[in-house]
Image (cartoon, rainbow, N blue to C red):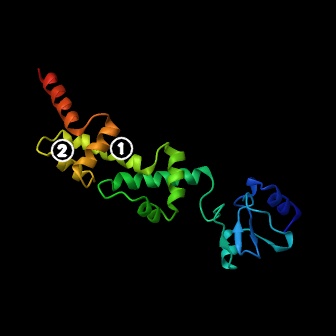
Amino acid sequence: MTKEQWQAIQERDARWDGRIYCATRTTGVVCRPSCRTRLCNIKNCVVFSTLDEALARGFRPCKRCRPDLPAFPGEKRALAEKAQRSIREHYQNKFSLKKLAEQLHVNESYLDRVFMEAFGLSPLTYCNQVRCEAAMELLTRLELSVTEVGFQVGYGSSSHFSRVFKSVVGIGPSAWRREWLAKLTRSDR
């Protein structure tokens, strides 16, 4: 370890994140240089140029700074966009943040936080918006009942569908369909 590296660790300099990883022999943990955990003794500190080197030597990733997760905004944005695509493709399935996080190989709370940073809403709220958009399209097909529309967009009960639809759109699905029909008949005249 160089003097410059040790100084970066002491100062918790985020500019060194991704360039070096500091591990503590006594705890067996590897961190980013910017980690806010208690500073280790210099004689117990080992510096690695890659996380894989530290993992290969038996160190485990810190649970606080998570050096094993993407850190810079571009990667966070890419992760949030992957989650967004997955939600759009699978909105009809039962929503589970846990399953989505497993699919993307990240922690649930991390995914929730990154998604919120990127889009200003939670993955569940986004899923409900996508479902309501699809429901509005389906509600224009009069052969489908409101209950059938709710089931087709992924809700397990018509009452839950109605509550969510009203909270997202502002009116219930039956009222929305009536308003759509009224506009349709006015435009046909």
Label for residue 129? 1
For mark 2, does the 10 Å Cα neighbourhood hold few (<14), some (14 to 19), or many (20 or more) residues? many
Q: Residue at x 29, y 41 (%)?
A: 165
Q: Dividing the picture into quarters, in which one does residue 142 lie? A: top left
For mark 1, does the 10 Å Cα neighbourhood hold few (<14), some (14 to 19), or many (20 or more) residues? some
User: In the picture, which quadrant includes the C terminus?
Assistant: top left
Q: Dividing the picture into quarters, in which one does residue 70 lie? A: bottom right
Q: In the visual, does 4 lie left or right of 113?
A: right
One can see residue 75 in this view: yes
Q: Residue furthest bottom?
A: 57
Q: Residue furthest top?
A: 189
One can see residue 133 in this view: no
Q: Nearer the viewer, mark 2 or mark 1?
A: 2
User: In the picture, which quadrant includes the N terminus?
Assistant: bottom right
Q: In the visual, does 161 lie left or right of 119?
A: left
- Asked if 157 appears above or below 28 in the picture, the reply is above
Q: Residue at x 71, y 62 (%)?
A: 32
- Asked if 14 appears above or below 23 in the picture, the reply is above
Which of the two labelled residues, at mark 2 and mark 1, occupies the earlier sequence position?
1
Q: Residue furthest right?
A: 3
Mark 2–mark 1 distance (CA, rounded to whole Å): 17 Å
Element under disc 2? helix
- Mark 2 lies on residue: 146
Task: Name the residue type under label 1.
Answer: Gln
Q: In the visual, does 117 lie left or right of 94?
A: right
Q: Residue at x 46, y 55 (%)?
A: 82
Task: Name the residue type under label 2.
Answer: Val
Q: Residue 108: x, y in percent?
A: 50, 60
